[in-house]
Amino acid sequence: MGILGRSAITRKPNESMRLIVTTFIGVVFGFLIGVSFPTIRLTKLNLPSSLLPTVDLTYVEDKNSGASDQTLLHTWSSVQNNKNSSTQAQNLNDTSKIWVPSNPRGAERLAPGIVASESDFYLRRLWGKPSEDLTIKPKYLVTFTVGYNQRLNIDAAVKKFSENFTILLFHYDGRTTEWDEFEWSKRAIHVSIRRQTKWWYAKRFLHPDIVAPYDYIFIWDEDLGVEHFNAEEYIKLVRKHGLEISQPGLEPNKGLTWQMTKRRGDREVHKETQEKPGWCTDPHLPPCAAFVEIMAPVFSREAWRCVWHMIQNDLVHGWGLDFALRKCVEPAHEKIGVVDSQWILHQTVPSLGNQGESQNGKKPWEGVRERCRKEWTMFQGRMSNAENAYYKAMGIDPSKTTAH
Ligand SMILES: *[C@@H]1O[C@H](CO)[C@@H](O)[C@H](O)[C@H]1NC(C)=O
Ligand SMILES: *[C@@H]1O[C@H](CO)[C@@H](O)[C@H](O)[C@H]1NC(C)=O
Ligand SMILES: *[C@@H]1O[C@H](CO)[C@@H](O)[C@H](O)[C@H]1NC(C)=O
């Protein structure tokens, strides 16, 4: 990740000096504690040394309070106390111990007021008041899975997203610093892991608790033409029409697979379509409704929380996900739709396909395509097994349900 390491911070000489002095004081103090508590055995003396970095920072933060020594002592002794009393807690019925079952799993020992269960991608300063770090809190998130070769396209795309968007790039080719030629790159988040897919990154880096501050999340491919697209306008339409899962209409050109995602010239959004005869068993079901493709989806916070859970860790291409999105919103044929008046071009650059590997004399993209199909079958299998198991456990006959 392109996050500043501590080593990258250029300290002024007198700052480094202060740090050295601080560390030194810390060491001496640790020693003094050891001396003044002779009953503490040697094994316990190992603890202060691992604590020192923390203590060091505590001191720096509190250097104006003049109470650094007390802070230090408190930090240290409370660790000791906790260590001891945690062993006691198993034996004693101590109501003074904190235990909050409604806290997030694993955090029950914390007072609810200190639990920070959600995060964000907001960049902060290393100085000043934390409350004054952010001049703007972006309400939307856009991610692109990119290779450096597509930089000009991505540069054009990013410019369609205002300052109300956090920009997050997943780099599948390991090239990140080169992107600094673009001014916006310095405020973007860069995640660099070679040869992974959009859904692999999304599962790992877009946990619903991490992206919680964002009203809408765009999870987009790199080969989209955005000339006729404006993100703020798009959001307005999505809100207006109550779309929890959406995509911009695709300009009809060669290679369009589905009627549903084809742009209509005469309206703001559409939520259903006609397909070729026999393709739709039900006009409210994919591919005639409740359906968008996986190349440029946009999720509301709530919808994403559900979809994230549906993404399988090993099925990295996301094939079949488009047909299952409807399971996350209700009624799906009203909350999933295509925005026609903000539309895009799908330029079909087989970029990630070229990241495959030749096997048994097949071309790289053939191996990738084959895996995509296989994953689709596997995903469908898992979904129907899971649903059948659920209905069975509930004592319901699966054939009588609406979840096909
Ligand atoms: C820690 O607790 C045990 C009892 O569980 C007690 O015997 C021991 O003295 C305590 N140690 C300290 C340092 O308080
Ligand atoms: C703890 O206290 C509660 C009520 O005071 C009692 O019901 C419970 O059995 C106690 N548990 C143990 C392990 O002593
Ligand atoms: C960003 O969001 C604010 C608040 O919703 C809005 O007033 C502003 O116009 C937005 N910026 C752009 C460029 O649309």
Image (spheres, rainbow, N blue to C red):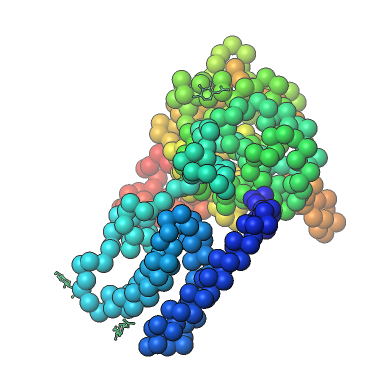
Q: Nearer the viewer, residue 199 or 49?
A: 49
Where does the image place residue 300, in percent across and percent down from the top left? 48, 34
Taking the spot 39% from the left edge, 66% from the top edge, the residue there is 70
On screen, residue 197 versus residue 73, left or right, reads right
Taking the spot 83% from the left edge, 53% from the top edge, the residue there is 362
Name above or below for residue 85 compared with residue 387. below
Residue that protrudes farthest toward the top in the picture: 266
Total marks in image: 0
Q: Is residue 61 visible?
A: yes
* Quarter of the render that holds ligand 2: bottom left
Where does the image place residue 35, in percent across and percent down from the top left? 44, 84
Where does the image place residue 386, in percent across and percent down from the top left? 45, 53
Name above or below for residue 367 compared with residue 123. below
Q: Nearer the viewer, residue 151 or 370?
A: 151
Where does the image place residue 399, in percent across and percent down from the top left? 40, 45
On screen, residue 286 versus residue 16, left or right, reads left
Q: In terms of image quadrants, where is residue 15?
A: bottom right
Taking the spot 58% from the left edge, 36% from the top edge, the residue there is 166
On screen, residue 123 versus residue 354, left or right, reads left
Taking the spot 57% from the left edge, 55% from the top edge, the residue there is 313
Q: Is residue 223 visible?
A: no
Name above or below for residue 215 compared with residue 266. below
Q: Nearer the viewer, residue 118 or 369?
A: 118
